Amino acid sequence: MVIKHKNIFTTESAWSDADKVLLCLDTGGWRTERPVLDQSKCNYCGLCALYCPPQCMLDKGDHYEANLAYCKGCGICAHECPRGALTMVPEGEFADEG
Amino acid sequence: MKAKKGTIRVITGNAVGAYGAMLCRPEVIAAYPITPQSEIAEQLAQFRADGVLDAEFVEVEGENSAMNVVLAASVAGARVFTATSSYGLVFMYDALQEASGFRTPVVMVNANRETPGIHAVSAGQQDMISARDTGWVQIIVENDQEILDQIIMAYRLAEDYDIQLPVMVNYDGYYLSYLAEAVEIPQIEDVDAFLAPLKKQPPRPRLVPGVAKGCGTHGIEMGYVEARYKHWQALERVKNKADEIDKAFGDYFGRYYGGQIEEYRTGDADIVVVASGSATGTARTVIDAKREQGIKVGLIKMRLFRPFPAEKLIEALKGKKAVGVIDRSVCFGWKYGPICTELMALSPKLETVPILSYIDGLANLDINVPHIGRVVDEVYAAARGKPYQEVTWIPMEEER
Amino acid sequence: MAARMLASAFVAEGKYVASFPMYGFERRGAPVVAFTRVDEKPIREKTQIYTPDCMVVIDPGLMKIPALFNGLKPEGVLIVNSKTRLKSKPNENLKIAGVVNATQIAVEEIGRDIPNTCLLGAFAAATGWIDLKSVLACLGDYLSGDMLQRNLKSAERGFKEVEVIKW
C-alpha cells in the first residue's frame, strides 16, 4: 500500500510560526544533580542567573531558584556564586524523581 | 611487488579520511570544520601534534579561504589536502573553479550533505551535484576502506602529468563519515611506493620565488578557448587513467574497486539498478535476495561521476531490458534525478529501454532494503512491458 | 562512542562490524541513536536498524515511550540503565533483559554520569555475545591513564552487577 506524504507546511518554502512552540524539550530530565541554595548565604547578586546557560534561573524577589523543568545540572551557577551559596546535590536524593 | 599487510583499526570514515591524507604526506593543509566532517581536521591536527604528519597548517576563517590557500600552495608546487561539505563546498564555489581552471592537483574529500535553502544538517548528495560543473574530477565511495584507498588513488590521479586536475572524493555524511568499521591502514612506505611513479614524470609548471610567471592569465579569445579545450580533453583522459590506477592499486594493495564503475552480478542480468555511495552496500544485499527469488538483477555502482563514465555504462547496459537509477539528490530543472538525467543523455546509444528514476535518501532518510526491493520489483515489471512511473520520490509515497 | 568501543571489541574477536550514530530530530532525553551491526562476514548494509536483536537504552526515561520496542525481534534483548528494577516484562518480544544502575556506578567510578562503559560490561554479561576480556581490552584504544582505569572498573562492575532476567 502506498502512503502519500501529508504536507507539513502550507507554504512553498519551510516557514514556521515562531509564536507557537516548535520544539519544547523538558531538558530537566537530563539532569543528574541539581543546585540547592543555602539562602542564608545568598545576597541576591544575580550572578547565578547571569551565568546560567539555559537562562532558567527564576527571580524569587530575594533569591534565585533554578527552574527544574529546564535545569540541566551543569553546575556553573554553583561554580560562579561568589558566596558558595549553591551546592550541586545528586538527583537520587530527591523524592520527586519518578 | 606487493604491499605489506596494513594495520587494522576500527575508526570512523572521517578518521579514515585523515589517515588517507596523512599517508600521502601533504605539505599544506587548510580545512575549516563543518558537520559532518569536523573530525577530519581535528584528526589531522592531532597527527601533526603527534609528529606523524609534517604539513604546514594554515588556519582559515572559512572554506573559501581554505580552497584559496590550498590551490595557491598547489600552484607553488605543494601537495595539498582539504575537506568540506555542503555549505562549505558552496562557500568555496569560485575557488573550486579556479582550482580546476589553473589545473592544480588539489585533493579534497567532501562529506556529502544537503545544501542550504532548507536547514540542511543531514545526508544527501546535493552538494556534490551543485558542484558538478566546476571542472573537478568527482568520485563517490561506498565504505570506509574505499575512502582511504580512493584518497591515495586520488593523488596518483590528480598529480599525473596527463591529468593535472583537482579530485573530489565524495562519501556520505553520517552514513560513512561517522561509520566505524574495521579498516586496514597501509604502511606509509607502501603508499610512498605507490605514489613514486609520479616523481618519474615531467614536473608540472609551478610558481617559484624569483622567477616571474603568471598563472591563469589569459582571459579572452583563443587563449581562453585553448585552456578550456585542454581542460575538457584532460577530463576525458581521466576515465582510462582511473581504470589504470585502480588496477595498479589492486595489484599492489590487493583491493580492486573497478575504476569508473563496478558491476555486480550484471553479466547475465535482465535488469539493472544504478546506485552510488553507501546505498550501494545495501543494494548488494537486495540484489542477492532478489536473485534467490529468481529475478536476474544486477547492480552498477557509479564511482566516477565526473567525468561521466559514458562508455562504460553503455557497455554495461547492453542487452539489459530496464534500468532503475537511484539518486540521493535532485536535478533542479529536470524531472529525473541528476545521475538518471545524465544516463538518459546516452539514450540514443542504449537500446530503447525503460529508464526509471528514483529519488530517495534525502535529508537523513534511509535508502533501505524495502526501498531498493521496491525499485527492483518496479524495474522488473517495466522490463516485462507493464506501465511504470518515470520518476518516483520514494519518501513522498512510501510503500508499507 | 560506546557503539564504537563495542565495534572494536567485536573486531578484536574476529567479527565484522559496522556502527554509526544518527542525529534525527531531538526527542526527550535521547538526542542520539547509534546502530551497530555484527556479523561473521563483511557487512554491506549501510542503513538504520529497523529490527534489532538487542537494544541498549542509556536513558531510562525512554522506557516510558511505547514505540521504543517497535521492530524488536522475537527473543530480543534489552540492556537498560535504570535504578529501579523491571516491574514487568516490557514487551512480548523480549527474552532477556539486563538491568543495571549504570548512572550510579559511573558517578561512583568515573565521577560523571557517563554510563556507556558500564553498559558495555552489562551487555557482555547479559547477552554472552562477547567476552568481557575483549571489551576491557579495547577500552585502551580510546582512553588512557586515570580515565582508562576508572572506565575499566565501571565496565567490570556493569558486568558483575547487572541483573539478568530471562523469560
Image (cartoon, rainbow, N blue to C red):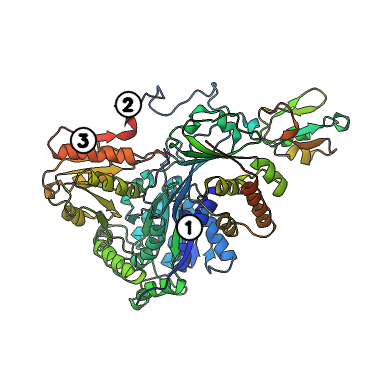
10 Å crowding of disc 2: few (<14), some (14-19), many (20+): few
Amino acid identity at mark 1: Val
Check if residue C47 falls in the magenta segment: yes
Q: Is residue B125 visible?
A: yes
Q: Percent position (x, y) of residue A57? A: 72, 29
Q: Residue at the spot x=80%, y=35% of the render?
A: A86
Q: Which residues are magenta?
A: C46-51
| Residue beneath disc 2 | A3
Q: Is residue B331 visible?
A: no
Please tell me whether mark 3 sits on a helix, a strand or a loop: loop
10 Å crowding of disc 1: few (<14), some (14-19), many (20+): many
Please tell me whether mark 1 sits on a helix, a strand or a loop: helix
Badge 3: chain ID:
B
**Distance Cα–Cα, label 2 vs label 1:** 40 Å
Amino acid identity at mark 3: Glu
Please tell me whether mark 2 sits on a helix, a strand or a loop: strand
| Residue beneath disc 3 | B390
Q: In this orientation, which residue lies closer to the viewer: B208 or B113?
A: B113
Badge 2: chain ID:
A
Q: What secondary structure characterizes most of the magenta part?
A: loop
Badge 1: chain ID:
C
Q: Percent position (x, y) of residue B396? A: 33, 30
Single out the mark in the foreground, 2 or 3: 2
Quarter location, residue B369 = top left
Amino acid identity at mark 2: Ile
| Residue beneath disc 1 | C11
Location of the N terminus of chain B (image quadrant): bottom left
Relative side of C105 to C4, left or right: right
